[in-house]
Image (cartoon, rainbow, N blue to C red):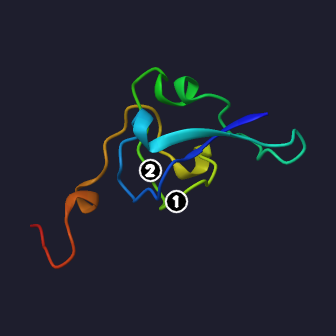
Amino acid sequence: VPVVVAAAPLAYGVRLEPSHLTVAHYPADAAPAGAYASIDALLNQSGGAPVVLSPMAAKEPLLPAKLSGPGARPTLAAAIGDGMRAY
């Protein structure tokens, strides 16, 4: 069955785009519960593309528990680089 996976490592706060994703084929009994079957189903949710809430490795299946709701924005903390501060 088709399963949407990360094409490359994904960091916290990344808004998903088609270039971040690819489809892998899993045996039906090995596909993770809740996995997305197509890139369109993941990106074209009402409200827009989700944001990564937990770092993911390349080829890791994208699951709802590691993504924000549709159209969510990353927090300010995701935009601040190492060695920087915000106030």
Q: Horizontal and vertical percent for residue 58?
A: 54, 57
Real-space CA distance between mark 1 and mark 2, rounded to the nearest whole angstrom: 8 Å
Horizontal side, residue 49 vs residue 27: left or right: left
Q: Which mark is residue 48?
A: none
Residue at 21 percent of width and 75 percent of height: 82
Per the rendering, the mark at residue 56 is 1
- Label 1 Cα crowd, 10 Å radius (few <14 / some 14-19 / many 20+): some
Q: Name the residue under label 2.
A: 52
Badges 1 and 2: C-beta atoms under 8 Å apart? Answer: yes
- Above or below 57: residue 1: above
Considering only vertical position in the picture, is 27 above or below 2? Answer: below
Residue furthest to the right in view is 29
Quarter of the picture containing the N terminus is top right
x and y percentages locating residue 87 in the rendered image: 9, 67
Q: Which amino acid does label 2 sit on?
A: Val
Query: What amino acid does circle 1 point to?
Result: Met
Secondary structure at badge 1 equals loop
